[in-house]
Amino acid sequence: MPETTPPAPALVIDFVNTLDVETGSDAIDSPGALRRWIEQRMGTRFRSVEEEAWRTAIDTRESLRDLLASHSGAGLNPSALKQLNRAGRGAALRPHFNDEGEATFEPINPGVDWALGRVLGAVMTAQSDGTWDRLKVCQAEDCRFAFYDHSKNRSGRWCTMRVCGNRAKTRTYRQRHG
């Protein structure tokens, strides 16, 4: 049975993984591409995305990648935290109660700020529901893919053992048996 990732962590992962570090492909490599990604992933239409808003989204994405890396032992990057705080202020998150009485954080401001607010709201949801520390970044420097650690003891280090984990273990073996 395939393992599923809860919705809040899945949104964060999808956003961070718009950049494939290994291949260099970027699904949001322009303001127009960001607009299309938001429309497809979040179902919200924008007329356009300004260059500055696009740069904020890129900086926020990479700051989230740095933050997720801290779940595997990397140090917290103070500039990443500052960027995430800036993005949160731009979104102006507020509590919203659904028909079942469950609270989420919803952004007030429109446009890209709204979309970034949705992602940051998902971070807050993951932190409150206990799934946050399962979001990690592959420790392979040529990968850095965000993933949800489904392991029972939360010790996952690579996005997939078949690829990045195998490469790392093979490298370690060759170094020891040079």
Image (cartoon, rainbow, N blue to C red):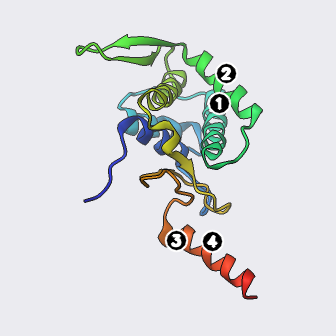
Q: Quadrant of the N terminus?
A: bottom left
Image coordinates for residue 69, horizontal then vertical, percent: 63, 46
Res. 14 mark:
none
**Circle 2 sits on which residue?**
86
User: What number is the disc on residue 163?
Assistant: 3
Of callouts 4 and 2, the N-terminal one: 2
Q: Who comes first in sequence, dot 3 or dot 4?
A: 3
- Tell me the CA gap for discs 3 and 2: 36 Å
The CA span between labels 1 and 4 is 33 Å
**Residue position for label 1:** 56
Q: Residue at x 67, y 21 (%)?
A: 86
Whether 29 is drawn above or below 157: the answer is above
Look at mark 4 in the image and give the residue it sits on. 168
Q: Earlier in the sequence, mark 3 or mark 2?
A: 2
Q: Mark 1, mark 4: which one is toward the viewer?
A: 4
* Viewer-proximal residue among 61 and 47: 61
The amino acid type, in three-letter code, at marker 4 is: Ala
Q: CA distance from mark 1 to mark 2?
A: 9 Å
Which dot, 1 or 3, sits closer to the camera?
3
What's the amino acid at mark 1? Thr
